[in-house]
Image: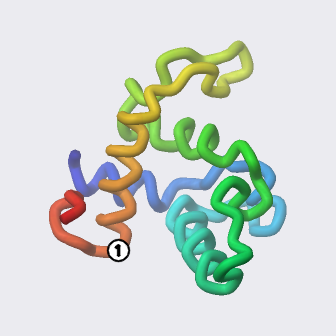
Amino acid sequence: MDISKIEEFLASPCDITSWRQTWSKTASWREWFADVLITLIEETESFSGKRPNCDSSWQWGVAKGLARLDPKIVTEWDSEGYPESVDWKRMEKVAKKVILHLCQIGGGERT
């Protein structure tokens, strides 16, 4: 995966609506990933992996965003432009590459 495309994605506006309500409308995906990690550290044992940043459907928003890097992540869209069907294994693979790049770890492969 092209690093410049990952950088472009991380700088683009995050479109997870419920999370954006607490940030500016121009908050980026880089800020969303950082916020999830900071929330994990702050909340320790009370951190909700099912509802990070108060959004139970967060993985659908991430899938929608990551589809910009790999359109095959979303296998079906609804009429309003939201994912209706997602290849979750593919999404996980791309998300890991993005996170490892964000943390500046190697070539995007977890060891």
Residue 56 vs residue 18, the one in the foreground: 56
Q: Is residue 23 left or right of residue 38?
A: right
Identity of the residue drawn at 42% across and 39% down? 91
| Residue 100, quarter of the rendered image | bottom left
Q: How far across and how far down the image is residue 50, in percent?
A: 68, 54
Identity of the residue drawn at 20% across and 58% down? 109
In the displayed structure, 51 sits above or below 104; it is: above
Residue 68 vs residue 99, the one in the foreground: 99
Q: How far across and how far down the image is residue 60, in percent?
A: 62, 38
**Amino acid at pointer 1:** Cys
Element under disc 1? loop
The residue singled out by tag 1 in the image is 103
Q: Is residue 25 left or right of residue 63?
A: right
Colour scheme of the picture? rainbow
Q: Is residue 94 left or right of residue 38?
A: left
Q: How far across and how far down the image is residue 31, in percent?
A: 57, 69
Quadrant assignment for the C terminus: bottom left
